[in-house]
Amino acid sequence: MFTGGAPGSAAAVPADTPHLRADGHVSLAWLYGGSSADYRAQIEAMAGLTTISPTWWYLDEDDPGGLELDTDDDLVAWAQARGLAVWPLFGNHIDPDLTDQVLRDPALRQRVVDGIVAEVRRSGVDGVNVDFENLHDETRFLLTDIVRELEQALPEVIVSVDVTAMTDTWVLGNWSTAFDREGLGQVADYVMLMSYDQHNSLRRDGPVAGLQWVSESTEYLLRTVPAEKVVLGLPLYARHWATDASARDGISLEATLGMAAMANRVAERSQAVTYDPVAGQDLHTWTDEHGRPNRVWLEDVASLQRKAELVDVHGLAGIAAWRAGFEQPDVWTALDAQLAAMSAPGSTVEPVPTTSAPATAPASTAPTAAADAAVEEGAVPAGGTPSGEPTVATQPLDQPITEPSPVDGTDVATPGEEDMVTLAAATLLGLVGIAHTIRWRIRRRARGR
């Protein structure tokens, strides 16, 4: 169990906590879909980083109670020698039935806990990041139980857990509702808020993480989780939408883009970039050769800093980015300086108005020639949200990303490829989400929680 320093006091941060910066904040990046060499190159480009979370550990789909372990001991040693904390991600392959089977059976759950404890101690890592997504609602409190059991069995390391975004009006079915956020906030050292995928293959045409939505998601979580335990997730990607009468609901998801690919799209076209004050992002629009209106809500240094400002406003524990390799180098330099100027976790400041356009429009960032591995198959997380067993293919980062969507688990569409989910299903999911929320609140009152 991490006790850390006193809230609001950066000077109280213990010297033996590599996951904390000198200013008391966590700065984490999830690693996914790359080789050890890829990861080392990515890490070396990240100013101010304190923690890495490689996607190494999963429930075994063929042996309930067993584990799939792919720890890179050399990378652990290399990262720790550079002062970084290593918290491997422990996922569930976004498989609700497997997860319920394992967590509901005390013997299977104990086998999982024992396996994680043994691997933590064998590998010498500094923590574990539990990323169980797409759960049945009935599994909610069982997730809290296993996080508690890991925390009790591993008092010497950090135990963190990922939760999806949710607001009073934005609910994505069980993806949102199947978390006992209050209970997780009591038993975990950190709760990682995956504040992205506001718009996805089910809810189309908008930013991945608009500023107002991220702010509301953060405030929703803070009702039940202490601010000094909340780590704010930041997306390093965006989605390209096109109006297309032949697509489901008239909107085509053309591609998911890393930051270099976004910059390329702006550089290739002369169409205007305008500021969207609700999203806190620049909106790039153009008409393609087929006469279709296209748009991308851009993530850049300025938009990420507007979201990261919520760390200071609410006294949050820090930031976590999905995922390493999607960003451009200046992102980490800017976030590093921003965190250094903030008050320590547990402190709060007056929010800066975010609904007006910037005094000067942010300059477009030039594309880079950086390359990375992109996942073709499998599910990602959260939030960092990685899940699934990836098949890796080398792909330049200035090209569209071809890995699955982080939150809804569906494959990201490529140009001209239509999503298999129907509009009726998407509408039903929204209605089911509202029903889940009502039922969840009734049960909480009945339980006195």
Image (spheres, grey):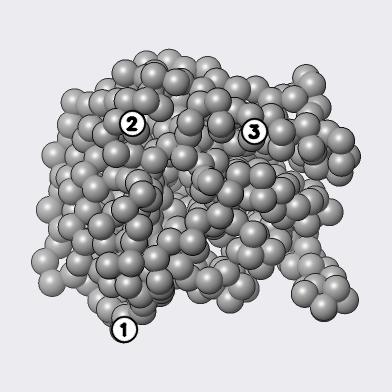
Residue situated in front as seen by the camera: 99 or 11 = 11
**Closer to viewer: mark 1 or mark 3:** 3
Q: Nearer the viewer, residue 94 or 262?
A: 94
Disc 1: which residue: 350
Q: Position of residue 271 (x, y in %)?
A: 20, 49
**Would residue 419 be visible to someone looking at this image?**
no
Q: Residue furthest bottom?
A: 350
Is the residue 339 above or below the residue 96 in the image? below
**Residue 72 rendering spot, x and y as whole percentages:** 46, 20
Q: Amino acid at mark 1?
A: Glu
Kindly report the distance in space between the C-alpha atoms of the residues bearing marks 1 and 3. Answer: 41 Å
Crowding near the residue tagged with mark 2, few <14, some 14–19, many ≥20 C-alpha atoms within 10 Å = many
Residue at image location 58% in from the left, 49% down from the top: 155
| Amino acid on which disc 2 is placed | Ala
Q: Position of residue 165 (x, y in %)?
A: 56, 59
Q: Of helix, strand and loop, which one carries label 3?
A: helix
Q: Is residue 123 above or below residue 214?
A: above
**Image height of 119 relative to 429, above or below:** above
- Name the foreground residue: 74 vs 214: 74
Quadrant in the picture for the C terminus:
bottom right
Circle 3 is placed at which residue position? Answer: 116
Which residue in the protein does label 2 denote? 79
Q: Is residue 381 left or right of residue 33?
A: right
Quadrant the N terminus occupies? bottom right
Count residues near mark 1 (Cα–Cα under 10 Å), then give few for <14, some for 14-19, many for 20+: few
